[in-house]
Amino acid sequence: MRAVPSDLAARLEGGAASLCHAWILTRADGATLGFTDHDRDLVVDGVTCRAASGWTAGASDAAAGFAPGQAAAVGGFDDAALTEADLLAGLYDGARVDCRVVDWSAPALSVSLWSARVAAAKAEGGAFTLSLEGPLAALDRVAGRTFGRSCDAAFGDARCGVDVSAFPGASCDKRWTTCRGVFGNGPNFRGFPTAPGEDFLTLYPNEGERNDGGRR
């Protein structure tokens, strides 16, 4: 449940609140920037939120349950705030964005709407677009390796070891037989070809066959 400060709740109930949005962006290196859609700068939680940035909320896709939800933020570059050089250098990748509703007549009164991280950043025509994903998106990311029959290396990378120039136009289907038979690269195969699959659960011994556990 979202906690609304009592003073702000009282203003809302009395119709005295003058509301706007503020976004506080915290980069991985600790740098903090603020933006607002109000017509003048506001100080929110100790961060100066600039009104001249042109930052606005783009399209959003809220999701129920455990779906991550996605949103976008757009704005113009500003040498005193978010610059194109910093964006292209990747300084905003993974940055945290907190969106707040603020009473601009009393900026100390605010309530958090949502938090997200910058999943992708794009510069185009003197403006930026940030693709934002909710906290539950972390549940969709694979951490570490997965164990499967197919190879999980990229064809020709350091883990694969194949010299792609020796096989012009070739591609790899990630199977053990292809790795060994076509490329002679069996020692570098990064999968587990003998791992049992779903069909293993349906196997059963047949009379007259050699049932020594070697059939999968």
Image: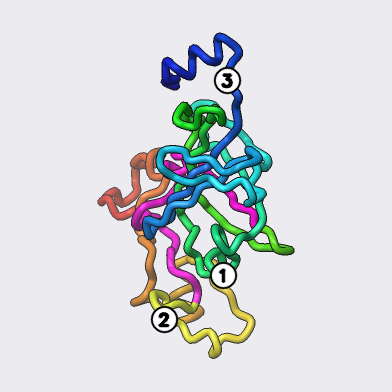
Left or right: 173 in relation to 58: left
Marks 1/3: CA–CA distance: 38 Å
Q: Amino acid at mark 1?
A: Ala
In the displayed structure, 125 sits above or below 106; it is below
- Count all numbered tags in the image, as a single digit: 3
Q: Position of residue 87 (x, y in %)?
A: 55, 64
In the displayed structure, 193 sits above or below 132; it is below
Q: What residue do we see at 57% from left, 20% from top?
A: 17
Left or right: 151 in relation to 67: left
Which structural element holds mark 3? loop
- Does the magenta-highlighted stretch encompass residue 7? no
Q: Amino acid at mark 3?
A: Ala
Residue that badge 1 annotates = 85
Residue that badge 2 annotates = 161
Who comes first in sequence, dot 1 or dot 3?
3
Q: Position of residue 135 (x, y in %)?
A: 44, 39
Tell me whether the residue at label 3 lies in contact with that at label 2, contact meaning CB atoms closer than 8 angstroms. Answer: no
